[in-house]
Image (cartoon, grey):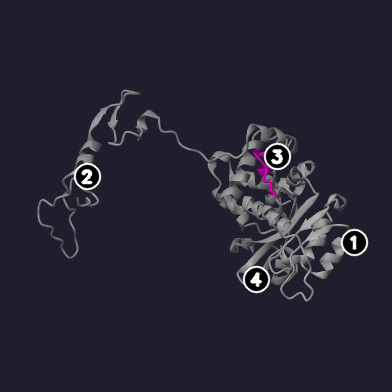
Amino acid sequence: MAKKASGFGKPKLKRTEPREIGPYTAAPEPLTGVREQVREDDSATESCPQCGCTGRHRAKPWRKHDKCGTRKKRGPRRMLTDRQWKLAKRFVYGERGKAGRNARNNREKLEGMLWIFRTGAPWRDLHEDFGEWLNIYQTFRRWVRRGVFFMMFLSLAKEWDLRVVMVDGTFVKVHQHATGALRNGLTPEESRVVQAIGMTKGGLNTKLMALVDRQGRLVTFSLVPGNAAEARQLQALLADVDVTEIEELIGDKAFDTDAVREFLANLGITVTIPWKSNRKNPLPYDKKKYKGRHLVENGFGDLKEFRGLATRYCKYAHTFCAAFHLVTWQRRTKGGNLRTSPYV
């Protein structure tokens, strides 16, 4: 039996009279069939079963009647749970505005800040449900100067497992709006270096250097220009960590230098770093443990789910760091199972 053609059994649209199109005007083609039937049902009126009013009802039953108020306006998505807000209260409670009174809508302000970094939208395009954008932006800047987000990030230190740590770097594309910060007598090139912006083959970039524990939790990080060498940033990362708790460090080939290996050997830290192709005397390493380095890549993926972090829109480096502090705190306090690796 021959296979039926697609659309078999559906009523076809027939042209009632020949189509004539002039050089400048084209009259709509009269249709007969399903589309005409839908238009007739669309213009029919009947009483609404909920409010009893008479209005136009669509042929599709899942569409609500606007006059009844059954269709609710969907607001922006919230990201803080009640448990998270209880944890954040001790950091933002008692914030005083210009009028000298305690701000009662700090939760909405915090939600607005997270919404900005989640969507990557400009501050002027902040959703009106969170409040006035300028007020929330000024609050964000004030909290950055007070170190509110940095203290929220440090509150996660008790959960770290530093026996095995992993280090890596990732690029963050710099948007054109993130350039042009105050120079203070410096040249444009020097100003970019101060704000952790460097020129690479792909344009202006910022490099995020991160150190994570054996469960992929962010321990410390730093922002450097995109053209900076990763191996030179390791000592600065370990300066903020209790190195006596670290037993092993896992890194990629970018950290395969004699200076890095000697520095870690003096600290009594075992290294799992593959050797570069140009090394004359290749050094052995545990390939099975090296597979556990995917945890730091997973951590970068979690952070870059926020579009305001995957692309840099902040002009100042300390403001961009505060965004990472806030997002990391939100991700860690959200709950859920932690990532683990059978290799470490």
- Of the two numbered discs 3 and 1 on the same chain, state the one appearing first in sequence: 3
- Mark 2 and mark 4 residues within 8 Å of each other at the beta carbon: no
- Of the two numbered discs 2 and 3 on the same chain, state the one appearing first in sequence: 2
| Amino acid marked by disc 4 | Thr
Magenta segment: 330-342
| Amino acid marked by disc 3 | Gly
Mark 4 lies on a secondary structure that is: strand
In the rendered image, which residue does mark 1 sit on? Answer: 266
**Label 4: few (<14), some or many (≥20) within 10 Å?**
few
Mark 3 lies on a secondary structure that is: loop
- Of the two numbered discs 1 and 2 on the same chain, state the one appearing first in sequence: 2
In the rendered image, which residue does mark 2 sit on? Answer: 35
In the rendered image, which residue does mark 4 sit on? Answer: 200
Question: Distance of mark 1 from mark 4, alpha carbons?
Answer: 33 Å
Mark 1 lies on a secondary structure that is: helix
| Amino acid marked by disc 1 | Asn
Mark 2 lies on a secondary structure that is: helix
- Of the two numbered discs 3 and 4 on the same chain, state the one appearing first in sequence: 3
In the rendered image, which residue does mark 3 sit on? Answer: 97
- Of the two numbered discs 2 and 4 on the same chain, state the one appearing first in sequence: 2
Q: Is residue 101 visible?
A: no
Nearer the observer, disc 1 or disc 4? 1
Could you tell me residue 33's position as x and y percent?
Answer: 17, 44
Q: Is residue 333 visible?
A: yes
